[in-house]
Amino acid sequence: GKNLGKGSALRTGFGVATGEAIIIQDADLEYSPDDWPKMLAELEKSSDISAVFGSREMNPERKGYWHYVLGVRFLAFLINFLFKSNLTDPYTCYKLFRAELIKGILLESNGFEIEAEMTVKILKQGGKIKEVPINYYPRKFSEGKKIRVKDGLVGIWTIIRYWLK
């Protein structure tokens, strides 16, 4: 069938998921499942925590193309400025949620901008997001890395649009 995008896939997955917590794991293994226990332990520390994000930025050995790193840092600045938060890596693809929280949010994005939408909607409803350092093994373009400048611009628009709503 047709690839309807990451957002569409996540909405489908959230709809059928069972259990108390939901973690997103991309199939390309840029993010290591070895980090799951650390993220889950953080979520279990307090019922006040809505989600735990795996932060590439908190890892002193941060890997990634410099223009991606700058883009992620700009998106973090924008989200933190607009939502009075203190996140280092809101665009991480490693997000662990309390199931009832993420199932209770109306998600609309079909593409990669779902990453921004999930983050800002949690923050907008007063949710508390914790971060833990994770390992990150970025793919090369030759290995199928797909994120482009356009995705960053769509991300900026997504952040501002949901801030204004």
Image (spheres, rainbow, N blue to C red):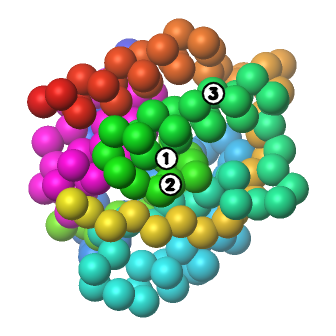
Res 90 label: 1
- Residue 41, percent across and down? 51, 85
Q: Is residue 35 above or below residue 77?
A: below
Q: Residue 141's quadrant in the figure? A: top right
Q: Which residue type carries mark 1?
A: Pro
Q: Which residue is mark 3?
A: 71
Tell me if label 2 and label 3 are in contact, CB under 8 Å: no
Tell me if label 2 and label 1 are in contact, CB under 8 Å: yes
Disc 3/disc 1 C-alpha distance (Å):
11 Å
Is residue 98 at all visible to an observer of this figure? yes
Q: Residue at x 80, y 37 (%)?
A: 64
Look at the image and give the residue range highlighted in magenta.
101-125
- Residue 149, percent across and down? 60, 12
- Residue 52, percent across and down? 45, 66
Q: Tell me if 83 is positioned left or right of 81 in this view.
A: left
Q: Is residue 95 above or below residue 51?
A: above
Q: Which residue type carries mark 3?
A: Gly
Q: Residue 60's quadrant in the figure? A: bottom right
Q: Nearer the viewer, mark 2 or mark 1?
A: 2
Res 87 label: 2
Q: Residue at x 52, y 41 (%)?
A: 76
Q: Residue at x 33, y 75 (%)?
A: 49
Foreground: 26 or 79? 79
Circle 2 SS class: loop
